[in-house]
Image (cartoon, rainbow, N blue to C red):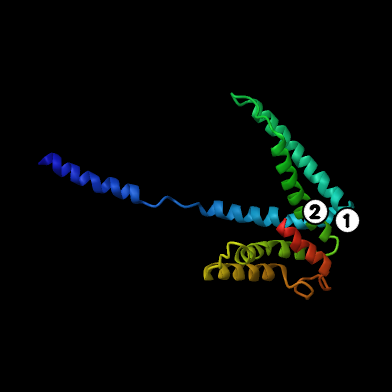
Amino acid sequence: MATTARASTATPVATRAADAPAPGPSRASIVAAFAAVYLVWGSTYLAIRWVLESMPPFVSGGARFLLAGGVLLAWAWWSEGRRPEGRERVGLAQWKWATLVGALLFLGGNGAVMWAETRVASSVAALLVAFMPCCLVLLEWLGPARKVPSLLTVAGLVTGTAGLVLLVGVPGTASAGDGHGVDLLGAGVLLLGSFA
């Protein structure tokens, strides 16, 4: 009987420990993550604007990605050589897909941002590029899947977009600090580049 009593008291303790929620991220890690988003992502558009004062958009973008790609290629070559099975052979199919993705991302997406920033303020560029989640929800809704967004999704998109407008200011108004309206060609290229 004593053995049965011990077994029955041990089980609830083990169950309680297994059911305990995992500890969440610390406040410091959350603050650090938000700081990284604000500083790294947000400063990208301002840095592009500064670079465009001395270099053409596609030259500066090409130099940026050539340098970054070279560093990544060297690291991949080095790390692949350390694998016990050796380096993986890259075939023609992989090169085709890499070329397509590279053209869409770096020429279509980032190239559009760099060119458009010659015509619009960096704050407008950040606002229009951050509008991309709304475009994706719209494409999913109007596309072949016909997935209607939930009320929670719509509320999140409206809240996020309102927050962006509040942070950046309404382009073409005194709150934006640009002193003039938005160039429609530049804004259109930014929106199209978001789809790439």
Above or below, 99 relative to 170: above
At 57% from the left and 70% from the top, the residue drawn is: 154
**Image quadrant in which you'd find residue 174:** bottom right
| Separation of marks 2 and 1 at Cα, in angstroms | 16 Å
Looking at the figure, which quarter contains the N terminus? top left
Badge 2 amino acid: Gly
At 68% from the left and 62% from the top, the residue drawn is: 130
Q: Which residue is mark 1?
A: 53
Residue 179 horizontal side relative to residue 20, left or right: right
Local crowd size for mark 1, using a 10 Å CA cut-off: few (<14), some (14–19), many (≥20): few
Q: Position of residue 60 (x, y in %)?
A: 84, 49
Q: Furthest residue to the bottom?
A: 173
Q: Secondary structure at mark 2?
A: helix
Q: Furthest residue to the left?
A: 1
Badge 1 amino acid: Glu
Instruction: Give whichever of discs 2 and 1 has the lower sequence position.
Output: 1
**Image quadrant in which you'd find residue 35:** bottom right
Tally of numbered tags: 2
Looking at the figure, which quarter contains the C terminus? bottom right
Between 55 and 31, the one lying in front of the other is: 55
Above or below, 187 relative to 41: below
Above or below, 171 relative to 80: below
Q: Secondary structure at mark 1?
A: loop
Q: Which residue is mark 2?
A: 111
The disc label shown at residue 66, or none: none
Q: Position of residue 76 (x, y in %)?
A: 68, 33
Q: Position of residue 138 (x, y in %)?
A: 63, 66
Residue 15 horizontal side relative to residue 1, left or right: right
Callout in the foreground (2, 1): 2
Q: Position of residue 116 (x, y in %)?
A: 82, 61
At 70% from the left and 30% from the top, the residue drawn is: 77
